[in-house]
C-alpha cells in the first residue's frame, strides 16, 4: 500500500511537472515583453534592461523555469499585470463563490445522478429507464449557457421566483446564499447528473449480470437488498472514477456558469484576464485547477480500497 | 426496448439530416419574414442561426478531425514503442489534467481570437483521449497471431502498422470521433459565448447568444433559437456516436 501510494505520488509529480512546463512556456511565448510592460510608456532601454535583470529574464530558459517553479511551490504565482496585486490574493478573494458553486453542484449531482442510475438499472428497458436515458443523452447535449438562460427566463424573469443573477456571500446568511445558487447549481449540474447517471446505470447493469447476483436472487434476497447491498457496492469503483474525471468538466462549466449568472468567482477572473491579457492570472488558475484535478483523482484512486476491499495495493 | 434499439440503430439515418440541411439553406438570402424575429441590431435571427451553423459545424468537424488524426498517429506509435510511449503519454497526462476550456482559453490568449487558433485550441485538449484509446486498442492487438505472423513473414514494421494494426483501431476511433465532435461543437460555442472564440463579427451560435444576453427579457428568441439549434446538433452527433457504437460492438447491442 505504502509503495503504491509512493508510486502514485511520483507519477502525480511528473504530471504536475508537465503542466508546469506547459504553463511556463505559455507565459514566455505570450506576446509582449513583461519588462517593457512594467516599465510603461516612459521606460528607457536602460530601465527595461534593469527590470529584466531584476526579474531574472536575462537568464537562460531552464534557469528561469526552475526559479519560477520554486516560487510557485512557495505559493508565489506572480503579480497580476492588470490589477498590480498578487495573483494568489486575487484568486483567494474570489474562491468562496466558486467553491460554493462547485461543492453544491457536486453534492447535488452525485446524489441525483447515482439515484437516477439506480432507478434506470433497476427496471432496465422499462419506461423509467427510457425516460432517464433520454434525459441523460439530452442533458449531455445541451450547452450549459443555453440551460442557464432558459432557467433564468422562466424561473427569474417570467415568474420572479428566483433572483436573475449575482451572488450573495455566505456571511450574509444561508438563505440568500442558497437562493442565489439554486439556478447556477441546476444549470451546472445537468450535464454532470447525466454523465454520472449514465455510468452508474451501465456499471450496475454489468454487475447485475454476475453470477453472485443470481445467487442472491436464488436465496431470496429482495430487489432492494440486491440493488443496495450487492450491486451498488460492486458498481462503486467505476462510479467513483467518473466522479473524479468529470471534475475537469465541472471546472469548464464553472467558468461559463459564472459568466451567465454574473457570479464574481475564479471563472470570471479568468475570462476578464483574457480580455486584459493578464497572463499571470491565467497561469495561476491553470496550475491550481490542474493541481486540484490531479489530487482529486489521486484521492479517488486511494479510496477504491474503501469501496472494494478486494483491491489491495 | 426494441424502440430504443431501432432509434439508436437508425441514428445514422436521421442524425445525418440536420447536418445535410444547412449547406442547402445557406445560399438563400435572409428571409424577409424574419422567422425567428430580429436581434438588437435588427438582423434576422433565422438567417444568422443558419449561417451560424456553418461556423459551428466547420469548427466542430475540423477540430474533431485533427484531434482524431493526431491522436491516431500518437496512439499507434505509442502502442508500439516503449520509450516514445513513456514520454508522450506523460505529456498527454499533463494535458488531460488541465480542464478543456481553460486550456483552450490559455492557447487562444496567446494570439487573440481567430478561427485557425480556435480549431487548434479545441483540438489539442481533445487529442489525449483519442491517443489513449488508440494506444489501448493497439496494445490489445499487437500480440494477436495475425500480427506476429505478418512480422515473421518478413513484413516491415511500418507496413504492419498500416495494414494490420491501423484498421483494427478504426471502429473505436470513429465512435470516439463522434464524441469528440460533439464536445468540440460545445467547446466552440462556450468559447464564443465567453468572447474568446470566433471573432464577434462572424455569426456563430455562441456569439449570437453572447451578444443577445442583455435582451433576454425582451427578445428571448434571440437566445433560444441558436441555443436550440446547438442542442439539436450536438444531440444528433451524440446519437450518431451511439449508433456507431452499436453497429461496431455487437456485445452492446445484444445487451439492450
Image: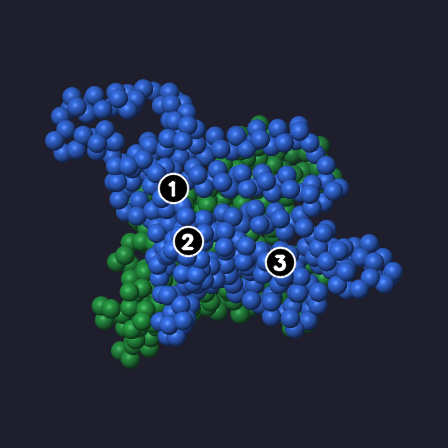
Chain colours: A blue, B green
Considering only order in the chain, which callout, 1 or 3, is on the residue closer to the N terminus?
1
> What's the chain of the residue with tag 3?
A
| Point 42% across, 34% down: residue | A22
Q: How many numbered marks appear?
A: 3
The secondary element bearing badge 2 is classed as helix
Real-space CA distance between mark 2 and mark 3, rounded to the nearest whole angstrom:
28 Å
- Return the residue at label 2: A170
Q: Nearer the viewer, mark 2 or mark 3?
A: 2
**Disc number placed over residue A104 in the picture, else none:** none
Can residue B212 be seen in the rendering of this structure? yes
- A83 or A277, nearer to the observer: A83
Indicate left or right for B2 with B133 as reference: right
Quarter assignment of residue B30: bottom left
Image coordinates of residue B168 in percent, x first then y, are 63, 47
Mark 1 touching mark 2, by CB under 8 A? Answer: no
Secondary-structure class at tag 3: helix
> Compared to A193, does B140 lie above or below?
above
Which residue in the structure is indicated by mark 3? A114
Comparing labels 1 and 2, the label whose residue is closer to the camera: 2
Depth check, front residue: A181 or A198 = A181
Q: Indicate left or right for B167 with B45 as reference.
A: right
Location of mark 1 (residue): A92
- Sequence-wise first label, 1 or 2: 1
Amino acid at each position: 500500500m505504502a509503495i503504491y501510494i509512493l508510486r502514485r505520488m511520483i507519477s502525480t509529480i511528473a504530471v504536475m511537472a508537465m503542466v508546469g512546463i506547459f504553463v511556463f512556456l505559455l507565459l514566455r511565448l505570450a506576446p509582449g515583453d513583461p519588462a517593457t510592460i512594467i516599465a510603461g510608456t516612459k521606460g528607457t532601454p536602460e530601465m527595461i534592461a534593469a527590470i529584466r535583470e531584476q526579474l531574472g529574464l536575462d537568464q537562460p530558459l531552464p534557469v528561469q523555469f526552475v526559479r519560477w517553479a520554486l516560487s510557485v511551490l512557495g505559493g508565489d504565482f506572480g503579480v497580476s499585470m492588470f490589477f498590480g496585486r498578487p495573483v494568489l490574493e486575487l484568486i483567494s478573494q474570489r474562491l468562496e463563490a466558486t467553491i460554493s458553486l462547485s461543492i453544491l453542484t457536486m453534492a447535488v449531482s452525485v446524489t441525483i445522478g447515482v439515484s437516477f442510475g439506480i432507478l434506470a438499472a433497476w427496471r432496465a428497458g422499462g419506461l423509467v429507464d427510457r425516460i432517464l436515458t433520454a434525459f441523460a443523452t439530452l442533458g449531455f447535449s445541451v450547452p450549459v449557457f443555453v440551460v442557464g438562460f432558459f432557467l433564468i427566463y422562466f424561473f427569474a424573469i417570467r415568474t420572479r421566483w428566483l433572483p436573475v443573477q449575482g451572488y450573495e456571500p455566505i456571511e450574509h446568511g444561508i438563505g440568500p446564499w442558497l437562493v442565489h445558487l439554486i439556478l447556477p447549481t441546476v444549470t451546472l449540474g445537468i450535464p454532470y447528473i447525466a454523465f454520472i447517471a449514465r455510468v452508474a446505470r451501465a456499471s450496475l447493469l454489468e454487475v447485475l449480470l454476475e453470477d453472485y447476483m443470481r445467487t442472491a436472487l436464488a436465496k431470496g434476497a429482495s430487489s432492494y437488498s440486491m440493488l443496495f447491498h450487492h450491486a451498488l457496492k460492486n458498481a462503486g469503483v467505476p462510479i467513483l472514477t467518473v466522479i473524479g474525471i468529470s471534475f475537469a468538466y465541472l471546472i469548464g462549466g464553472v467558468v461559463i456558469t459564472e459568466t451567465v449568472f454574473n457570479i464574481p468567482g475564479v471563472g470570471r477572473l479568468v475570462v476578464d484576464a483574457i480580455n486584459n491579457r493578464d497572463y499571470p492570472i491565467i497561469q495561476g488558475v491553470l496550475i491550481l485547477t490542474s493541481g486540484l484535478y490531479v489530487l482529486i483523482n489521486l484521492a479517488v484512486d486511494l479510496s477504491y480500497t474503501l469501496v472494494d476491499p478486494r483491491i489491495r495495493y | 426496448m426494441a424502440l430504443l434499439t431501432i432509434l439508436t440503430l437508425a441514428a445514422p439515418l436521421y442524425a445525418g439530416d440536420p447536418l445535410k440541411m444547412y449547406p442547402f439553406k445557406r445560399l438563400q438570402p435572409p428571409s424577409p419574414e424574419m422567422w425567428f424575429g430580429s436581434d438588437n441590431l435588427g438582423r434576422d435571427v433565422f438567417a444568422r442561426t443558419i449561417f451560424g451553423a456553418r461556423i459551428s459545424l466547420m469548427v466542430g468537424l475540423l477540430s474533431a478531425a485533427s484531434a482524431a488524426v493526431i491522436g491516431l498517429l500518437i496512439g499507434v506509435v505509442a502502442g508500439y514503442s516503449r520509450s516514445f510511449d513513456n514520454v508522450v503519454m506523460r505529456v498527454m497526462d499533463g494535458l488531460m489534467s488541465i480542464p478543456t476550456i481553460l486550456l483552450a482559453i490559455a492557447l487562444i490568449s496567446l494570439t487573440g481570437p481567430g478561427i485557425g487558433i480556435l480549431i487548434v485550441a479545441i483540438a489539442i485538449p481533445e487529442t489525449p483521449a483519442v491517443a489513449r484509446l488508440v494506444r489501448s486498442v493497439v496494445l490489445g492487438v499487437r500480440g494477436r497471431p495475425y500480427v506476429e505472423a505478418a512480422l515473421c513473414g518478413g513484413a516491415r514494421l511500418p507496413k504492419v502498422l498500416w495494414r494490420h494494426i491501423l484498421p483494427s483501431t478504426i471502429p473505436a476511433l470513429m465512435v470516439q470521433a463522434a464524441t469528440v465532435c460533439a464536445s468540440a461543437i460545445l467547446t466552440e460555442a462556450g468559447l464564443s459565448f465567453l468572447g474568446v472564440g470566433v471573432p464577434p463579427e462572424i455569426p456563430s451560435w455562441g456569439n449570437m447568444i453572447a451578444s443577445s444576453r442583455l435582451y433576454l427579457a425582451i427578445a428571448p428568441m434571440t437566445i433560444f433559437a441558436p441555443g436550440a439549434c446547438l442542442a439539436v446538433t450536438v444531440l444528433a452527433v451524440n446519437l450518431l456516436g451511439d449508433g456507431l457504437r452499436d453497429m461496431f460492438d455487437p456485445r452492446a447491442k445484444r445487451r439492450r
